[in-house]
Image (cartoon, rainbow, N blue to C red):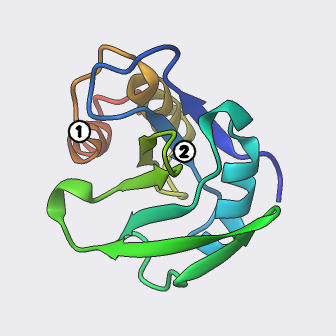
Amino acid sequence: MPAPRLLLTAGASRGPLDGAWWPRCDALELELPALVDALDPGLGTVTRVTVDTAAWPDAPRTVLAPGHVIAVSLSWVVTEAHAITLDCGTVGRWELLVVPPAEPVAAARWLLSTAADPYNHLTAADMLALAEAGFGGA
């Protein structure tokens, strides 16, 4: 897979999100290894991810990543829709907006940069609704 389309918050995040990820397809087993491989090793090893069942209906329960296996948890919680949570053991936890693979480029760029803004206070669902309404660079 090519390098992931990913933008993380620089410094400490003050909002609900720590950045955004724009996968190329909805096959988590193909996309997740490239995502975790692209993360700074200082963030720790991703041991578990939680994804939204609506966005990833066919997500496997485990995904092989470089050098380890990642456990996949499925969430039905509405507040976690359109997001992925990366658990890195004792190092920390990161919440990323998941930009839908088919999102138009202009809207996706707005979503990536807005989610990575340390002062952004919008949730993933709010940001996607704005992008869909045409306020997100579309």
Q: Which residue is mark 1?
A: 123
Q: Amino acid at mark 1?
A: Thr
Q: Is residue 130 above or below residue 11?
A: below
Q: Quadrant of the N terminus?
A: bottom right
90 sits left or right of 135 in the view: right
Q: Position of residue 21 (x, y in %)?
A: 54, 44
Judge by depth and name the residue closer to the eye, 130 or 134: 130
Q: Nearer the viewer, residue 119 or 131?
A: 119
Disc 2 designates what residue? 21
Q: Residue at x 63, y 42 (%)?
A: 44
Q: Which mark is residue 90?
A: none
Image point (68%, 39%), residue name: 39
Q: Is residue 136 left or right of residue 47?
A: left
User: In this rendering, would 34 be left or right of 43?
Assistant: right
Residue 26 appears in which quarter of the rendering? bottom right
Location of residue 120 by image quarter: top left
Q: Amino acid at mark 2?
A: Trp
Q: SS of the residue at dot 1?
A: loop
In percent of width and height, residue 84 lies at 42, 55
